[in-house]
Amino acid sequence: MNISGFIPVDTLTKLNSMTGTNNTYKLDSIVGNDEDKSTNNDTAIDFSSILKDKLNEVNDKQVSADNMTNQFIAGDDVDVHQVMLSTQEAQMSLQLAVQIRNKIVESYQELNRMQV
Amino acid sequence: MTVNNISGQQITYDLIKKSLDASSTRADVISNNIANINTAGYKRRYVTFEDTLKQSLDNITMKKDNSLHMDDGNSFGAISVKEDSSSSMKVDGNNVDIDSEMANQAQNTLMYQALTSQASSRISMRRYVITGGGN
Amino acid sequence: MGAFTGLNISSSGLSAERLRMDTISSNIANADTTRTETGEPYRRKIAVFQENLDRELNSVTGQYETKLKGVKAVQIVNDNSSLRQVYDPSNPDANAEGYVSMPNVNILNEMADLISSTRAYEANVSAINAQKSMFSSALQIGR
């Protein structure tokens, strides 16, 4: 899942200019340029990397639900409640991620409507 | 922004999952005891979980500031299958009491059902929050 | 434990008890059989059970774990206690002194064994029902 796909670069330029020199939005890391981490401000809140981590966690939950189901079908050592709970958790994580995406898209559209 | 405080809700949910594992193992062990009711020399087995749980639960609730890895729930206490080697009255050395096994089984089944219903309600609650009370 | 371990364990118990009941039925039916294929009188048969276990190496923890698999019937042995001697000179199988060796089957003992076997069978059936209801309630998670 590529984050830069749904947060275009020019919006972030607008955000950066609005917050002045506080540079909390890491433009580089959002377009995928991760090699330069050492020069980044470590104490600043990095929204894009949080988002990336959480999406990876959502993906991990999907993968683990798939693995559990496969093991269950193959007759391995999983219990039925483990399979049910892992699929429910995966579903909820995905729903949450989709809702967050909706909110981000809404706020992006809101920003676009602003008269600058 | 890291989450160091594991909320009480999360602890309870992980505890429910671990307890479901223990209950499921216990059901299998009780079935094994019942199947071996007429096996000479067989000693009944049982599952320990709740006694090690009590101890570790105190440790967990006190240390709220640690980032505990709750993923597999092993901090709660191990589920272990033990053998009860007490001697029995029967001539063939078998110490399975059919009535106590049936009673344990009924109790365990109810516990499992209560736990699944709890897990289910928690999931519904979270889903309600996620979907904003709508669809 | 796998998802259906409990059911497999209970079904092994059912098979074992059914075998035992068949043995008992054979004993009762042959309580007066003075001549079998070998020429000997019928000897009471006993089904011998053993716990069915698997010891396997867990690749994750590196330790041996026992997997419970219920019960298995290992043998059907003859009861080698002495045969009853009954005085009946008119019987074709009587020996020189007129005594017939009758099978060492005591009907009352066999009936008591049959009752205990039936009770064990019913207990295994209730174990299967308990496992089934647990399984069904797990399937309701999240509905």
Image (spheres, helix red, strand yellow):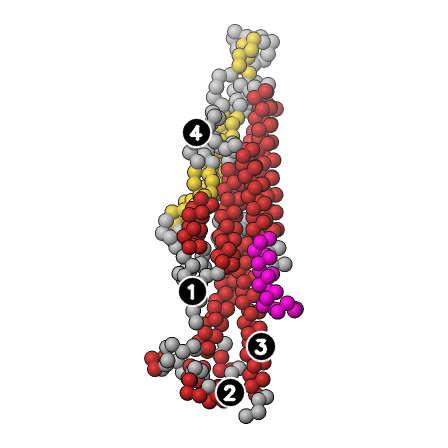
Q: Given the image, on which type of amino acid does mark 2 rest?
A: Thr
At 57% from the left edge and 77% from the top edge, which residue is drawn? Answer: A103
Q: Is residue B129 magenta?
A: yes
Relative image position of residue B2 (x, y in whole percent): 43, 69
Q: Is residue A42 magenta?
A: no
SS at mark 4 in the image: loop
Badge 4 crowding class, 10 Å Cα cut-off, few under 14, some 14 to 19, many 20 or more, is: few
Image: C6 above or below C16: below
Mark 4 → mark 2, Cα distance in angstroms: 78 Å
The dominant secondary structure in magenta is helix
Q: Given the image, on which type of amino acid does mark 4 rest?
A: Ser
Mark 4 → mark 3, Cα distance in angstroms: 66 Å
Q: What residue is shown with label 3?
A: A102
SS at mark 2 in the image: helix
| Residue range of the region highlighted in magenta in the rendering | B117-135
Q: What residue is shown with label 1?
A: B4
In this rendering, do the residues under marks 1 and 4 share a single chain?
yes
At 55% from the left edge and 83% from the top edge, which residue is drawn? Answer: A108
Q: What residue is shown with label 4?
A: B87
Would you identify the image quadrant in which residue B99 lies? Answer: top right
Relative image position of residue C97 (x, y in whole percent): 52, 7
Badge 3 crowding class, 10 Å Cα cut-off, few under 14, some 14 to 19, many 20 or more, is: few
**Label 1 chain ID:** B
Q: What residue is shown with label 2?
A: A11
**Label 2 chain ID:** A
Badge 1 crowding class, 10 Å Cα cut-off, few under 14, some 14 to 19, many 20 or more, is: few
In this rendering, do the residues under marks 1 and 3 share a single chain?
no
Mark 1 → mark 2, Cα distance in angstroms: 32 Å
Can you tell which of label 1 and label 4 is closer to the viewer?
1
**Label 4 chain ID:** B
Q: Given the image, on which type of amino acid does mark 3 rest?
A: Asn
**Label 3 chain ID:** A
